[in-house]
Image (tube, grey):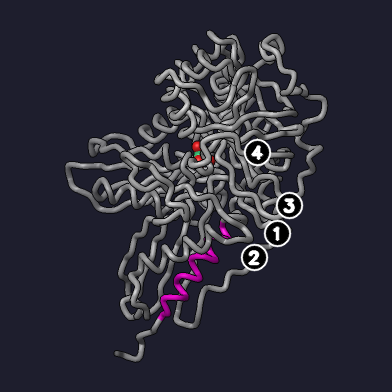
Amino acid sequence: MNKKTRTIAGKDITKSVADALQYISYYHPPDYIRYLSQAYAREQSPSAKNAIGQILVNSRMAAFGRRPICQDTGLVVVFAKVGMDARIKSTASFADLVNEGVRRAYLDPDNPLRASIVADPLAGRVNTRDNTPAVIHVDLVPGNQIEITIAAKGGGSENKARFTTLNPSASVADWVVDTVSTLGSGWCPPGLISVGIGGSAEKAMLLAKEAMNEPIDMSELIARGPSSAEEALRIELHERINALGIGAQGLGGLTTVVDVKVATYPTHAASKPVALIPQCAANRHLKFTLDGTGPAQLQPPDLSEWPEIGIGELNLAGVRRVNLDSLTKEETAAWRYGETILLSGKMLTGRDAAHKRMVDLIDAGKPLPVDLRGRVIYYVGPVRAVRDEVVGPAGPTTSNRMDGFTEKILAETGVFAMVGKAERGPAAIESIVRHKTPYLIAVGGAAYLISKSIKAARLVAFEDLGMEAIYEFEVQDMPVIMAVDVEGNSIHNSGPLEWRKRMAADSIARNIGV
Ligand SMILES: O=C(O)C[C@H](O)C(=O)O
């Protein structure tokens, strides 16, 4: 063994992974908080400003309360750069060491994280209960240390990953902008768009996934100017994506992305592979280095950087208040898209697996285990409660995954309203109009804040589905926005359109010097 060689204990890898996953579950990266605070200050769209405000309030609460920022505590992705002069002392494989760290982090009794991983994605889809396995990428590099970048990637943003192979002379910028304009807002903007260009299909994806963990530095880049084609593309994409007007949560507004990352790799003369992966507002990642002296020492961030936004600033005073326990069809028909509502009373929860099971029961002519008539259904898979909590972080999940079940659920159960996140597709909007059943949204990325408006939670059905079981929540003043009203008007159609037009007009005015 040469004297440069260092021995790194397997148990230090496991402990560092566990500590890092706990850390990123409640601490946003400070650079993201800085950029989001600037976006909050700049935002002119009232609903987008409110959404960003909720995300910032939530982030501060999560950091001080050491509870997850988002109910979706993610799929663990690891990029390990292992020095060729580092020796790992363990009989377990590197993957086993990492997965043991994942298990410990997600089952931590003080801050249990939500287990979201299902084994056998094709058929069984049974939850592995400890969020293993992680997706692990290992590179052998010069040196005697191990550098690990670890991320906990939310499912909603990962679902919007896209790939194409362009002709060599085609414009990457045009493809990215066109593609982002079709993604909707299930990826929880404001966040980042990361683009990998070159290599092969899988290499382009890896480039995009790894680049999104780089520090956010768009303002600095704009100030100093681009020094490469990649940097020029980043600036162009940042400007063009924000000009789409998608805004926070797709409500229409000035900031859709706080940064755009671009990474490249040599490729075949015939090809231009391009991968695009969005990063959501939960944006959880951390880099640490192991040099053989023990596990990573993670210092808490300086929380004075987290802005103190009072609930009063979120403009919730004077909005419509609704009692869910005495809801009528006449009342829900009067709600107009775009208005903010505070919900109080009892609602049911149910997301992907519960919807599938309910529709299977309906198709088989069997009764449902819960009567949905006159009820509101909230698409959510919460984190387990600890200590005096009623429920852990409980933000909305992407609603359009429920679209395929919506007609049957509305027609057969008599649900009065749905609450979720992001836009609905055309078929779901038709069902909303047909059955006069409106759709509301809560802010994705404000899960811990939302959980504080839940005063009681009771398991009602499908216990075996874990976080996907049906619960009854009793809520008080839960803030939601009317997204699709019974006439089929959708804030996700009108909001971005309005802000796209406003920004285009502003930019014309700037160009002609008005
Ligand atoms: O699984 C979830 O809770 C949410 C998911 O990340 C989503 O954004 O749809």
Judge the density around disc 3: few (<14), some (14-19), many (≥20) Cα neighbours within 10 Å.
few
Give coordinates of residue 84: x percent, y percent.
31, 77
Judge the density around disc 4: few (<14), some (14-19), many (≥20) Cα neighbours within 10 Å.
few
Indicate yes or no: mark 4 CB to ligand 1 under 8 Å.
no
Locate residue 84 relative to residue 401 in the image: left or right: left
Give coordinates of residue 16: x percent, y percent.
50, 70
Check residue 458 in the rendering and tell me which mark sits there, or answer none: 4
Amino acid marked by disc 1:
Leu
Nearest to viewer (mark 4 / mark 1): 4
Amino acid marked by disc 4:
Arg
Nearest to viewer (mark 2 / mark 4): 4
Q: Earlier in the sequence, mark 2 or mark 4?
A: 2
Quadrant of the image occupied by residue 455: top right
Q: CA distance from mark 3 to mark 1?
A: 24 Å
At 71% across and 39% down in the image, what residue appears?
456
**Element carrying mark 3:** loop
Q: Can residue 313 be found in the magenta stretch?
A: no
At 28% across and 48% down in the image, what residue appears?
202
Q: Earlier in the sequence, mark 3 or mark 2?
A: 2
Check residue 388 in the rendering and tell me which mark sits there, or answer none: 3
